[in-house]
Image (spheres, rainbow, N blue to C red):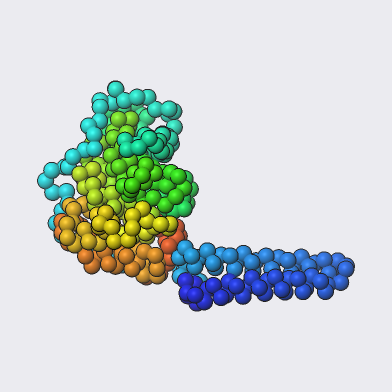
Amino acid sequence: MDLLSDAAYWLAGALALVALVAGAWLTSRTPRNWKGTLLNGVAVLVAGVMMVTSVGLVLNRQNGWYSSVGDLFQSAQSTTDNYGAGSPFEGAEGAAPAAPPPAATLPPLPTRDRIQRFDVPTSVGHQTWNVTVILPPDYFAAESSAKTYPVVYAGHGFPGSPQQYLEAFDIQKMGDNAVRARSIKPFITVIPNITPTGADTECITGPDDVQQLETWLAKDVPAFVAGHLRAAPGRTNAAWLGFSLGGWCGTMLTMRHPETFGAAAALGGYYQPWWVGPAPWPAGDARADGYDLVKMAGDKPPAVALWVQSSRKDTQSWPRTEQFLKAVKPPLSVTAVIDSSGGHNFSGWVGHGPAVLTWLGETVPGFKP
């Protein structure tokens, strides 16, 4: 059965109705003894399971997590193709967002823990938004005191928070394993809160203070990182990783700011803003054109490297990904990994995490071990 079809709603409603009616009918007709109590318990348990299944079907249909029952138990088959041509990193290294000061002049960190949290002010408006940082294993080692590190900026989903990279998508463990395997150089992970007010921002430059995420993410956060951490300068030392909303944000920021970011990896991403609520500008407004990455990939492709993943069963990501891949022209370079099955969910994304880090280590000069 297609769990993303309209039939899923009908099934969910039927299960809920049967659970309520059957549960009420059975519990009103059982004898008042231990057998009746046992039957009542079983009836309540079955009714509860049916209600939870019903709610799960509705949430799955709305969020596109699993396209079929088989997705719960089977691993997707993937194909990998390359689009565009040439090397985005040939020649100049690219401009750094800010020249890092000598290590001795960096302000002290709040703690000597690998996980740090900062409030980073915005240069547009009067907001201060939070950032979570994961430092590499050897950051505090005496022999590493003058060492600088490339930076992975990580974008979470919506709804979601930076905590997703500490739990469901455990990038610290994933990164440590990749470093031990010499697939990638030790790196700093910077996880900005891309929905600081809880609303969908799409990481764009909008008409008010709340929607100035693009300036904050492309300029303020990299400058803060350069001034507080031993981050290596230049776009070949800065890349984005993200899933769903975070995949869109990372790809958009990299394509619109290639002087700051050299690469991005998007899991279940998309290539035009996808507003959960109302868009910040009216339909047809010219300001939206600058955020159409499909158009940019064909008309003015930047010299950056992208790694994109989607599933042909992911109704939220695949149609937009397919359009994007058809439009790609050099010097934009894209590696596309397309799964045969799977939905818009962590179970399909987490398994690709090690491959993303390996790709960064093989493709982007600053991340090569």
Q: Residue furthest right?
A: 33
Q: How many marks?
A: 0
Instruction: Give above or below for 38 relative to 136.
Output: below
In the figure, residue 47 lies in which quadrant?
A: bottom right
93 or 294, which is in the foreground? 294
* Residue 236 visible within the image: no
- The residue at the point 77 percent across, 73 percent down is 26
Give the x, y percent position of residue 204: 32, 49
- The residue at the point 49 percent across, 68 percent down is 61
Give the x, y percent position of residue 224: 32, 33
Give the x, y percent position of residue 163: 47, 45
199 or 229, which is in the foreground? 199
Q: Which quarter of the rendered picture does the C terminus lie within?
A: top left
Q: Residue furthest top?
A: 104
Instruction: Give above or below for 287 relative to 23.
Output: above
- The residue at the point 37 percent across, 42 percent down is 209
In the figure, residue 219 lies in which quadrant?
A: top left
- The residue at the point 25 percent across, 62 percent down is 294
Give the x, y percent position of residue 363: 23, 51
In the figure, residue 229 lies in which quadrant?
A: top left
291 or 185, which is in the foreground? 291
